[in-house]
Amino acid sequence: MDVLDKAIQFAVQAHEGQNRKLSDTPYILHPLEVASIISTMTDNREIMAAGVLHDVIEDCGVDPALIREQFGPRVSALVQSDSEDRLDPRPPAETWVERKADSLLMLEHTKDMGVKIMWLGDKLSNMRSFYRYYKQYGNEFWKDLNQKDPAKHGWYYKTIAKHLGELKETFAYKEYIWLLEEVFGK
């Protein structure tokens, strides 16, 4: 079985019964959208597979060793690049800035275009959701997230854009920038 097909089957099982925050949308649609966005930037099926699997460690409790065993070192490394350390016993709202700063540091220093492509796929999917909710509810929707301050989300997503500048010629990056400006301003 192809690595992408296998990843889709794995992710469907791992995310079974989960919904996206702020909606009743089945969670699996987010990683599938991420893989679809990735496919506009590369035909590398390992990067697409990692996009499908990017939340299984942090949101489903899947052991990183299992990802490595099932999908190999490349997919495993990509998935782990977009997985936050949630071992801190403090509530996620308290550790949000710290976790995001750690992730941004990794993104800033990576030379791996696969990591950058996967991050853009994930964050563009998130920004599409933010835009829909922002247009529908205004700033009220932030109250339902771990981080309730839209300015902090703006800092995070705008900093990501700076670190993904190598992808500025892609349609995905251009859409990402447009959504950033629509939701957070210039």
Image: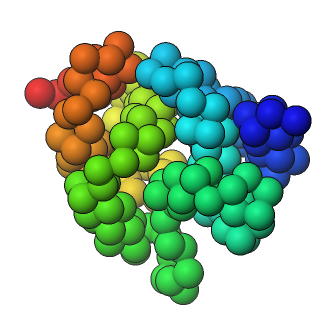
Q: How many marks?
A: 0
* Residue 54 position within the rendered picture, expressed as x and y whole percent measured from the top left: 60, 49
Task: Say which residue appears at 49% left-offset and 65% top-offset.
Answer: 84
* Residue 113 position within the rendered picture, expressed as x and y whole percent measured from the top left: 37, 40
Q: Quadrant of residue 11?
A: top right
Left or right of residue 182: residue 21:
right
Look at the image and tell me whether residue 152 can be seen.
no
Residue 35 higher or lower than 96, as above or below: above
> Which color scheme is applied?
rainbow
Task: Say which residue appears at 77% left-offset and 64% top-offset.
Answer: 69
Left or right of residue 136: residue 177:
left
Q: Quadrant of residue 52?
A: top right
Left or right of residue 143: residue 36:
right
**Residue furthest out toward the top:** 171
Image quarter in which the C terminus is found:
top left
Task: Say which residue appears at 49% left-offset and 17% top-offset.
Answer: 40
Look at the image and tell me whether residue 4 can be seen.
yes
Q: Nearer the viewer, residue 71 or 99?
A: 71
* Residue 45 position within the rendered picture, expressed as x and y whole percent measured from the top left: 63, 32
Image quarter in which the N terminus is found:
top right
Q: Nearer the viewer, residue 16 or 185?
A: 16
**Residue furthest out toward the left:** 186
Left or right of residue 186: residue 26:
right
Q: Nearer the viewer, residue 69 or 32?
A: 69
Task: Say which residue appears at 39% left-offset and 57% top-offset.
Answer: 147
